[in-house]
Image (cartoon, grey):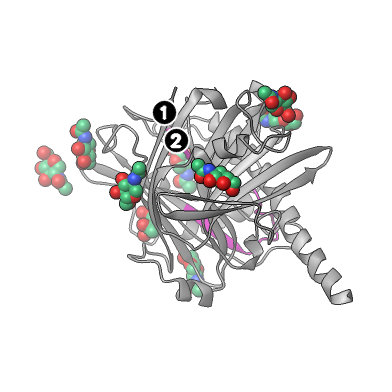
Amino acid sequence: MALTLLVNTLLLAIPLGGSVGTLAGIDAHRAATGQKGLFTGDDSSNGGTGSSGGSSGGSDSTGGGSGSNNTISDNHTKNSQYCQSSYGITPPTQGEQFTLNPNQWGVTDTTSGWLCMNVTTFNNETYATKTTAPDWSVTWQFDQGPETQPVHAFPNIQVEDEFPLLVDGVDAIDFELAYTYGVGKTVATTMDESALTAASLQANVAVDMFFDADKERAQNSTLARLEVMVWFARFGASSDPIGYPTVVTTQTVNDTKFELYKGPRTAGSTTQYVLTWVAATNTDSFKGDIFPLVTNLTSLGGDNYPNNTDYMGILQFGTETYSADSNVTFAVSDLAIDVKKS
Ligand SMILES: *[C@@H]1O[C@H](CO)[C@@H](O)[C@H](O)[C@H]1NC(C)=O
Ligand SMILES: *[C@@H]1O[C@H](CO)[C@@H](O)[C@H](O)[C@H]1NC(C)=O
Ligand SMILES: *[C@@H]1O[C@H](CO)[C@@H](O)[C@H](O)[C@H]1NC(C)=O
Ligand SMILES: *[C@@H]1O[C@H](CO)[C@@H](O)[C@H](O)[C@H]1NC(C)=O
Ligand SMILES: *[C@@H]1O[C@H](CO)[C@@H](O)[C@H](O)[C@H]1NC(C)=O
Ligand SMILES: *[C@@H]1O[C@H](CO)[C@@H](O)[C@H](O)[C@H]1NC(C)=O
Ligand SMILES: *[C@@H]1O[C@H](CO)[C@@H](O)[C@H](O)[C@H]1NC(C)=O
Ligand SMILES: *[C@@H]1O[C@H](CO)[C@@H](O)[C@H](O)[C@H]1NC(C)=O
Ligand SMILES: *[C@@H]1O[C@H](CO)[C@@H](O)[C@H](O)[C@H]1NC(C)=O
């Protein structure tokens, strides 16, 4: 009996800690998206919180880069590295606009570890297709944080200029993804899960979306009534989703089976409801429409699920970094997000 209680407390404590952090992190991110990006040289966010811990990784300039942010260019592409705790990178594009952010919101003076984000842009100011995002990667290592705040960062890419949209006004969100997570500071060619386990990696790979009946609140990750996540992978027990281990329902999208977990999270005076679809087995690639994972929820009904008159305000994709014993690299080689309106 005592043991059961203890276990339950632990399971509860972990997601709660993580959640509060997620909120703060995305808020930090939202604050940063207002900043000018790569090509304007304005970095007013850098004087803000936690540049202390986050920037310790700035020493990771092993590649012989030159100029600001270790930029290496040839005639076609440019690779820049960002070790700032929070920095909005909005490369020019002729298609879908994205903002990238290292978003190291959980890094404090006492954090041991570092994180740097690399972004590859095309000099012709476009990408391979209208909906393709720039290639990016994150290399990091963090020691385990306190149970109340185990997440150190949510480095992510956010879709700009599409939201807010009524749920009813979205036809599909075609999502194409290929990535690797690997041990070391270089991009792994394949994902070796046993090596990641041996490195005690605690992290997930996830889409993060926010909903509310109010247009403005839907665009504020702290105030939005609902958060819906889609996890393609999770590594280590720290990253149990809220509501784990009770699976509410399952849904299969183009051969990838997702299991739904649900539960509330309270931060201060606000309670937000969190719905998390987790791939039943980790997958390093995906192609399909993720919007049925939202619209199928509308049929469940009630305040804890989105409905057709709710607004979708935010769509981000990234990795929540908890901890790892070795340096690890998350590299996104293929990402295209196509928001189709009805
Ligand atoms: C990165 O580039 C921005 C814009 O040029 C600059 O303000 C910032 O100081 C650079 N950061 C580093 C670590 O070089
Ligand atoms: C991880 O990378 C950092 C920064 O380059 C380096 O100082 C450290 O030795 C590396 N850690 C391991 C375990 O290789
Ligand atoms: C990131 O960029 C830095 C600086 O150019 C380079 O040293 C490092 O190897 C790059 N990391 C990856 C994973 O590409
Ligand atoms: C870049 O372009 C210049 C001028 O056309 C050319 O001389 C040089 O070889 C090119 N460099 C690379 C790396 O392609
Ligand atoms: C832009 O540059 C990239 C990288 O060199 C190339 O693959 C792409 O075809 C170019 N796009 C256009 C429209 O020229
Ligand atoms: C979101 O709402 C919170 C609470 O009202 C506020 O402090 C924060 O500034 C808002 N964030 C944005 C990006 O508007
Ligand atoms: C939506 O979820 C319900 C409940 O599990 C399931 O029966 C139904 O097949 C799902 N719909 C789709 C389109 O997958
Ligand atoms: C389903 O996945 C396969 C394999 O990646 C892909 O070729 C196909 O286009 C996907 N179907 C849809 C509807 O996205
Ligand atoms: C949708 O949900 C909101 C919040 O729970 C509620 O106010 C609204 O009445 C719902 N709309 C419908 C059509 O059910």
Q: Earlier in the sequence, mark 2 or mark 1?
A: 2
**Residue 129 percent across, percent down from the top left:** 28, 35
Q: Residue at x 72, y 38 (%)?
A: 304
In reply to whether residue 329 is colored magenta, the answer given is no
How far across and how far down the image is residue 100, in percent? 47, 40
Which residue is identified by label 2? 173
Quarter of the image for residue 266 reads: top right
Q: Amino acid at mark 1?
A: Lys
Q: SS for tag 1?
A: strand
Residue 111 visible in the displayed image:
yes
Q: Is mark 2 within 8 Å of ligand 8?
A: no
C-alpha span from label 2 to label 1: 6 Å
Quarter of image, res 46: top right
Q: Secondary structure at mark 2?
A: strand
Taking the view exactly as shown, the residue that stands out farthest to the right is 2
Instruction: Check disc 1: other Cα within 10 Å, few if <14, some if 14-19, many if 20+.
Output: some
Q: How many other residues sit within 10 Å of disc 2, few (<14), some (14-19) or many (≥20)?
A: some
Q: Residue at x 28, y 33 (%)?
A: 126
The picture quadrant for ligand 5 comes to: top left
Q: Which residues are magenta?
A: 98-116
Q: Which mark is residue 157?
A: none
Question: Is 140 situated left or right of 219 in this image?
Answer: left
Is the C-beta separation of discs 2 and 1 under 8 Å? yes
With respect to residue 59, does 220 lie above or below? Answer: above
Question: In this image, 205 relative to 310: left or right?
Answer: left
For disc 1, the marked residue is 340
At horizontal 65% and vertical 64% (from top left) the residue drawn is 238
Report the amino acid beneath label 2: Ile
